[in-house]
Amino acid sequence: MKKFAIIGALVAVALSFTSCKQEEDPQYHAPTTFTINEPALKDQAFRTASDMTDTETFNLFCSQPDYGYAAVCNYSALVSLDPKAPEDQWLALENTTPASAKMSIKTFELGVAVNKLLQVADAEDFANRDLGNKEFVCYFKGVCEIPGIEGSRIVSSNAVTYNKVMINYAEKTPAYIFICGDIANIETGAANGFLAPTAGNFDIYKENFALFEPEDMIGEKLYVGSFNLTPKDSSMDNFNASNPDACAQFRFFTDLLGWSADASLGSNEADFYCLNITDKWVAGYSGDVVTKGLGNWGAFVEVPTAVTIVVDQPNLKIYIKEGKHEVSFVGRDPEFN
């Protein structure tokens, strides 16, 4: 009996080692099947939002395709008004929880897509066709991919429906963020001077101190703007490039909620910390952005000096180039022209 017990223990150890090795060394393979689940509430009527800030969502569900291991995936959806439509007539819908197979999609995004599929020219065209009083059957497919793995993208072989979708006119307009600090608007001459980022100052900020998404990058959360850096008082002690307090400083806000960190994008978590980039920004500076960061970027200037700034919010990157430039993009990388 002792001999069999020893053999059994050795077998168990070997099996355990093999199991651990398999778990530690997963083998990727491209999936061949992927399906999306029929929504339980597919016959429940709902209306899409017309305001891009509206947070109302609807859900789609799927399960992870077989990649050979439990991969971290991104999920999204496609929508069409015809289940037999060619590929270019299925429009992409962003999942607000991209890592979740329980997709949560803004009704505003669906409204924008359906308006495009119906080839709606503008709000007047929408009203003349009485589209707001019609119900549409919308067809959805699921999409899954592993970020960074070429060839991992797979579209569901089936489509599901929501059968009673009513739409409002909806179009995407460029989103924006605000800049706050020792800067001035190049065209209007309005100076910010760390104007309080509050709702009461919204009109001033929107008109003078906003960075906008380019028209061809709407929805990408890449923000572009050109401003003048305004010099500090030259009579101050240590008025030179090595003194952060002598630098023109600035940071960004995604909303005007006051000096709270909740809507702040800065160079550092510390309040009014200054990341001095004087020796870098003339040739072109790139660096990291801190969510809820209250620190500033700063550069020493002796006269008002134009800079062009790009903030990539999803990737938490900032790009700064001296001068007023037109900006184009290769992927998400800016080129200052």
Image (cartoon, rainbow, N blue to C red):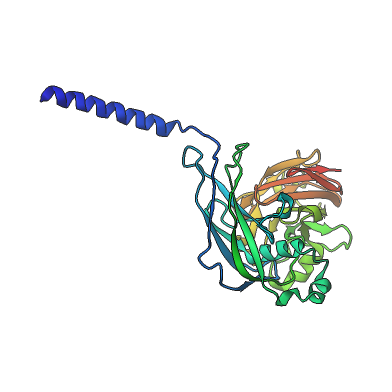
> Which quadrant, please, contains the N terminus?
top left
* Residue 25 found in image quarter: top left
Coordinates of residue 163 in the picture (x, y in percent): 61, 68
* Residue 57 found in image quarter: bottom right
Residue at 81 percent of width and 41 percent of height: 282
Coordinates of residue 308 in the picture (x, y in percent): 81, 49
Question: Farthest top residue?
Answer: 3
Coordinates of residue 30 in the picture (x, y in percent): 55, 37
For residue 106, side relative to residue 122 (left or right): left
Residue 193 is at least partly visible in this image: no
Q: In front: 143, or 250?
A: 143
Rendered position, 202 above or below 180 = below
* Residue 53 found in image quarter: bottom right
Residue at 24 percent of width and 24 percent of height: 10
Question: Farthest right residue?
Answer: 187
For residue 99, side relative to residue 228 (left or right): left
